[in-house]
Amino acid sequence: MSVPSVRALLVDAMGTLVRLLPAAARLRAELAERAGITVSEAEAAQGLAAEIAYYRTHMHEGSDRASVAVLHRDCGAALAAAMPSLAGADPDQVTAALLAALRFAAYPDAAPALRRARERGTRVVVVSNWDASLPAALTDAGLGGLIDGVVSSGQAGAAKPSPEIFARALGIAGVPARAATHVGDSLVQDVAGARAAGIEAVWLNRAGAPIPAGVRAIASLREL
């Protein structure tokens, strides 16, 4: 895909640049080491599913370091509530085990794509529904040095598909909507959201799903 007039690349994080590594086995190990509690793989998976559901509903509450800490504590509580083996466990130990178990890794096509964009003089701004810890997560995944700016829904006070979060990203990039392209893996949050903000949208269709009429799609970030 070649768009010579594009001066800014806005890009989603989860499912586009990074993925959550399988966490159940690490959670079991962390709980055993930190709290001396043994849980089954199935119970760990059940707890993580509950935690992820809670996080997706409340991620916008993590707007700064202090509120992110509160969000993490509440996520730990959601995890514990879904795992009978954690009844009576120290909340701080549960939260610490959870955070140690959650790790994000960059997709193989992420760093090369961001590097090529910047070599062309294109500014790269990550726009994602995440709490204020997103910059640290991207740095841990090895992408921090390839990004010019980050806008999370927690920091922006608005989540995709709201045009507000895209407007914040355009401000960081220093370009009007017509000079930007947004890439993400969600038809609603990324494609519809970017279009509502007047931004050209590209759907990252990693799974090879049917492509709706009128939607520009790529199967890999290598196609950017």
Image (spheres, helix red, strand yellow):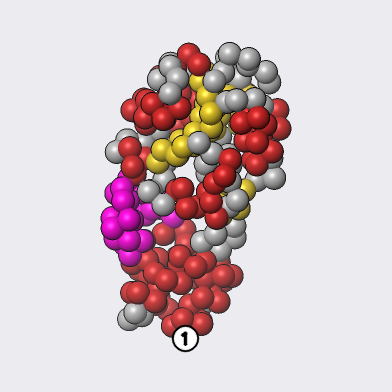
Residues drawn in magenta:
52-74
Residue in the foreground of this view, choosing between 68 and 161: 68
Quarter holding the C terminus? top right
Residue 76 picture quarter: bottom left
The extreme bottom residue here reads 36
Task: List x then y, in percent, for residue 95.
Answer: 39, 69
Left or right for 45, reference 58: right
Name the amino acid type tagged 1: Gly
| Residue 165 in the figure: left or right of residue 183 | left
- Looking at the image, is 29 positioned above or below residue 221? below
Residue 136 included in the magenta stretch of the image: no
Where residue 169 sits: x, y (%)? 42, 30
Determine whether 5 is above or below 108 in the image: above
Majority secondary structure in the magenta region: helix
Q: Position of residue 142 (x, y in %)?
A: 60, 51
Q: Work out which quarter of the rendered image holds the N terminus and state it.
A: top right
Does residue 89 appear in this view?
yes
Circle 1 sits on which residue?
36
Q: Secondary structure at mark 1?
A: loop
Figure quadrant of residue 88: bottom left
In the rendered image, residue 62 lying in the magenta stretch gets the answer: yes
Of residue 185 and residue 13, the one placed in the foreground of this image is: 13
Q: Quadrant of residue 23?
A: bottom right
- The crowding category of the residue bearing disc 1, from other C-alpha atoms within 10 Å (few below 14, some 14 to 19, many at least 20), is few
Residue 10 x/y as whole percent: 51, 29
Image point (50%, 52%), residue name: 137
Looking at the image, residue 5 lies above or below residue 40? above
Can I make out residue 193 in this image?
no
Residue under the image location 40 percent in, 41 percent down:
152
